[in-house]
Image (cartoon, grey):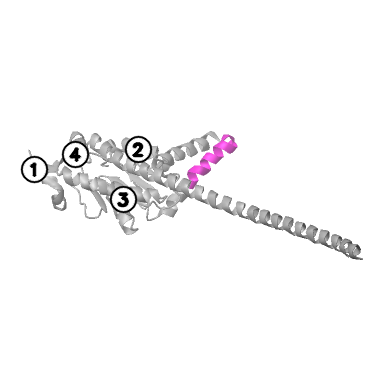
Amino acid sequence: MARTTYQDLLDAGVHFGHLTRKWDPKMSQYIFMERNGIHIIDLNKTLTKVEEAAAAIKQIVKSGRKVLFVATKKQAKDIVADYAKSVNMPYITERWLGGMLTNFATVRKSIKKMSNIDKLTKDGTYSNLSKKERLMIQRERIKLETLLGGISDLNRLPAALFLIDVKKEHIAVSEALKLNIPTFAMVDTNSDPSNIDFPIPANDDATKSISLITSIIIKAIEEGLDERKRDKEDEAEKEAATAKAKADAPEVKDRSENEGGKRTRKTADVVADAETEAPAAETTEE
């Protein structure tokens, strides 16, 4: 079943590109025509590409890995943050720090520092500090939360990146390229799609367009999470059935042993009776 339709894309303004003078020639394969000095994106190709991207991202999530959402442009950050939170995925919607991926160990230290500040607040140490020290710590906590709050639960490198506007997020793209992390992105007519593994030709400036494409990716992630959950439940049921079968097997064995014991006792009784009757017969003959 298709995750979206041609009409949905049209209504969201996904087809509107940039001015023709701002175009990137590498996007020519995704451009349908030019109208009033603006390039129009071929929505048939957008449909195909968004389906490919959704199917691939679904398999990544199904395997239990994380997808990092990156959108630092003003009109996209709130939309992407809300969608990412809904499926418990990490996100970056403020400034992309250089080395966020390539120097991930250092980033993890900053995240740990943020959790240490939270511990100070909980155990009462924070209240024993001077007013100036508390203010400094509070400011640092707010700064760390703003920059790294969306990836506080990310314990290892993400399995993939989903980006809005690859031209703006070029540092993130280059870092992902160095680490061979697959990239999914909305690519407008002024961007270079050649470094993106799953480019989705679309208007990356309009909020409706951003919301629609992001929602399709989120639905795919939800499907992947649901399938993973079902697979785990099925596996748990199989393990429970196997354990039950193993637990039942000794009972059958014990029952057969008990029956064998009964048969043995019956045989002994018959032999004893026969031996008792034998002398009686001999006495009669005499």
- The secondary element bearing badge 2 is classed as helix
In the drawing, what numbered circle is on residue 34?
1
Residue 106 position within the rendered picture, expressed as x and y whole percent measured from the top left: 44, 53
Residue 50 position within the rendered picture, expressed as x and y whole percent measured from the top left: 25, 45
Residue 221 position within the rendered picture, expressed as x and y whole percent measured from the top left: 35, 44
User: What's the distance in space between the residues labelled 2 and 1, CA to CA?
Assistant: 33 Å
Q: Earlier in the sequence, mark 1 or mark 4?
A: 4
Looking at the rendered structure, the kind of residue marked 3 is: Ala
Relative vertical location of residue 112 with respect to residue 285 in this rendering, above or below: above
Looking at the rendered structure, the kind of residue marked 1 is: Glu
In the drawing, what numbered circle is on residue 56?
3
Looking at the rendered structure, the kind of residue marked 4 is: Tyr
Q: Main secondary structure of the magenta part?
A: helix
Asked whether the beta carbons under mark 1 and mark 4 sit within 8 Å of each other, the answer is no
| Nearest to the observer: residue 257 or residue 42 | 257
> Is residue 23 inside the magenta stretch?
no
Which residue is at 15% across, 44% downward? Answer: 42
